Amino acid sequence: MKVLLDACVLYPTVMREVLLGVAAQGLFQPLWSPRILEEWARATVKLGPGAEAQARGEIALLRARWPQATVSYAPSLEARLWLPDPADTHVLAAAIAGHADLIVTLNAKDFPRQILAEEGLARLDPDQFLLKLHAAHPQLVARAAEAVRLEAERLSGEPWDIRFLMKKAHLPRLGKALAAGG
């Protein structure tokens, strides 16, 4: 399954690391465009000095790890598309060009299901997407989430409860499922 990841799900670190950890388990092939990665880098500016440089380093690692994930498309593709927010048509264009099955985004209102269906696409928020993958492959998703939890503990020097960490990362249903041991 090919899944286009919108910038809004790549920018929060824990959410991104869980999604990419699950992709590394082979449960989906991630896709993005150069513009999506640029949006992620620019969004970090508000975090203060050095944040954008760190994001660009993470993006370089991401590109090296998944070289086939970067999607490009002709400007004419984007020009023929319509979404409620014209600034999001590039996401839809990348999904179409990459032959994605799904767009994972937090911006439901900007990606109406009927418009996506016309292009053979669906949309899920990251919590819904990961919960579906967890239902089908609980051990693989749990393994990816546990690796993120351990890294959070290493970086913070504090213990992290998996349910609380996932809730903080806007993945509350996944956190509940993981805490239940399923």
Image: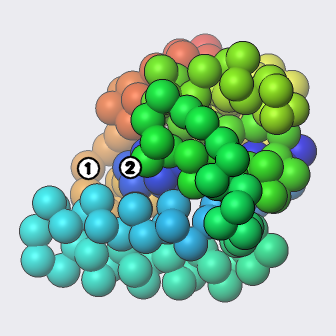
Please identify the quadrant where the N terminus is shown. top right
Front residue of this view, candidates 59 and 113: 113
**Could you tell me which residue is drawn at 38 percent across and 49 percent down?**
12
Answer whether residue 58 is visible to the viewer in this image. Answer: yes
Report if residue 146 is visible in the image: no
Mark 2 surroundings within 10 Å by alpha-carbon count, few (fewer than 14), some (14 through 19), many (20 or more): some
Q: Position of residue 143 (x, y in %)?
A: 69, 46
* Residue 110 position (above or below residue 30): above
Looking at the rendering, in which quadrant would you find the C terminus? top right
Give the amino acid type for the residue marked by disc 1 in the picture. Answer: Glu
What residue is at 19 percent from the left and 67 percent from the top? 45
Vertical order, 16 against 110 (above or below): below
Q: Amino acid at mark 2?
A: Pro
Residue 22's spot in the image, x, y percent? 71, 48
56 sits to left or right of 132 = left
Residue at the image position 87 percent from the left and 51 percent from the top: 99
Q: Mark 1 or 2 closer to N-term?
A: 2
Q: Secondary structure at mark 1?
A: loop
The residue under the point 32% across, 44% down is 159
Q: Which residue is mark 1?
A: 158
Mark 2, secondary structure of its residue? loop
Q: Which residue is the site of mark 2?
A: 12
Tag in front: 1 or 2: 2
Please provide percent x and percent y for residue 117. 80, 24
